[in-house]
Image: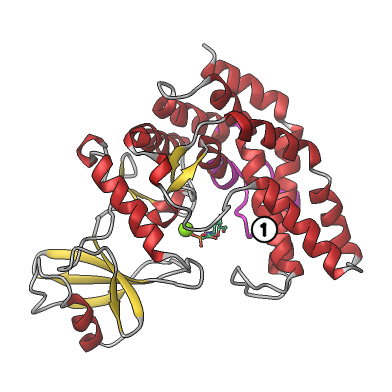
Amino acid sequence: MVKENIAGILAAYSFNSFEDFIFHPFGAGLIHGTYLIESGNSKYILQEFNNSVFPYPERISNNQRLVKTQGDEKLLPFRLPLPLPNSAKKLITEWNGKIFRLFDFVSGQTIQEITALDQAYLAAKAYGVFAEWGKEVDTKQLQECIPDFHRLDLRFAKLQEVASERGNPSTEDQKLLDFYLGQVELIAEYKDYQAVLPNRLTHNDTKINNLIFSHDLLKVEALVDLDTLMSGYLMYDFGDLVRTVACSESEISGNWDAIKVEIPVFEQLLKGYWEGVKSLCSKKETRSLLLAGEVMTCIMGLRFLTDHLQGNIYYKVNYPEQNFHRAKNQMILLQSLQANKAELEEIWKSVTQS
Ligand code: GN1
Ligand code: MG
């Protein structure tokens, strides 16, 4: 991107003249192109929007506008940097057939994995506080930015469909298919919850790197990556924390023997999340937090394996077997969560039932 182009986009924003600015590519995001803009003493993030992953930018804007107007950001102990409105009061700016958004820059540190248990607690508490805060937002007015994003039953049905269309899987693929298509009990438990859980404002991508910590890592300064704000269940947000933070290895690791749930991390995540949501949680919702990690790990495994069988059409891969390996990684984590259920339940009881 050249400076004249950036200046052309920034011209849509009148709260700052942007007469004199510098810019650099910023961050490690894989979906949207991101730039840091420095103009006088102010810093902003300019993002080029990826339309193929998110085909409905207007739905994202609708949800973000709703959250901005129905929620009172001042009540949150951290920032929620939503796109800044342009001169036409729109949250997205079209320029040369592309879409851009501008955000306030939040100074701090992002981490890819925790280096101390209290970081798990702080992260989960921030997402829990966010869920509690979001009760003011009317979930019926929230739109589906990505339809059926976390519907475990439909992701399961999709894998069945793709597997039967393709036929003749390799022995390796068949092993994973047998495992995932054997998760009927988990799908049934999910469907039972689906009938009773209330809809909440959920973030839907609660990884550790979607938080900005203070430089000393002792406080959460902001919750970012707000494109998947939608109506969902608390178990989606808590479950993705368990899947990504309480796993001994990252989701791209092929160190099969080392992949397992880290029980002390699970405990800190639950303590932190519970701190945020306890005043909100129904009985069933509280119970669903125990299954949450399994639900989200299974969803990602199903999505990775489906994408592998479809020839890697959704997730970026660095080598052809990468989605197969991601699905295998998630399978081992799911097996570990299931094998340790009794111990996780003891923790769940002591945290939520005392
Ligand atoms: C995608 O690109 P990233 O990391 O923000 C995906 C998530 C998955 C994740 C798995 C819109 O998120 O649902 O958890 O990959 N986001 C979308 O790495 O599909
Ligand atoms: Mg994301």
In magenta, the rendered stretch is 241-264
Label 1 CB sits under 8 Å from any ligand 1 atom? yes
User: Foreground: 224 or 347?
Assistant: 224
Q: Which amino acid is tagged 1?
A: Arg
- Determine the residue positioned at 55% across, 19% down: 283
Q: Per the image, is 42 magenta? A: no
Residue 8 in the image, given as x and y percentages of width and height: 20, 83
User: Foreground: 42 or 166?
Assistant: 166
Left or right of 180 on screen, residue 253: left
- Determine the residue positioned at 47% across, 24% down: 281
Q: Per the image, is 250 magenta? A: yes
Which residue is denoted by mark 1 in the rendering?
303
Q: Is residue 106 shown above or below 279?
A: below
Left or right of 218 on screen, residue 227: right
Residue 238 in the image, given as x and y percentages of width and height: 52, 38
- Label 1 residue SS: helix
Residue 152 in the image, given as x and y percentages of width and height: 66, 46
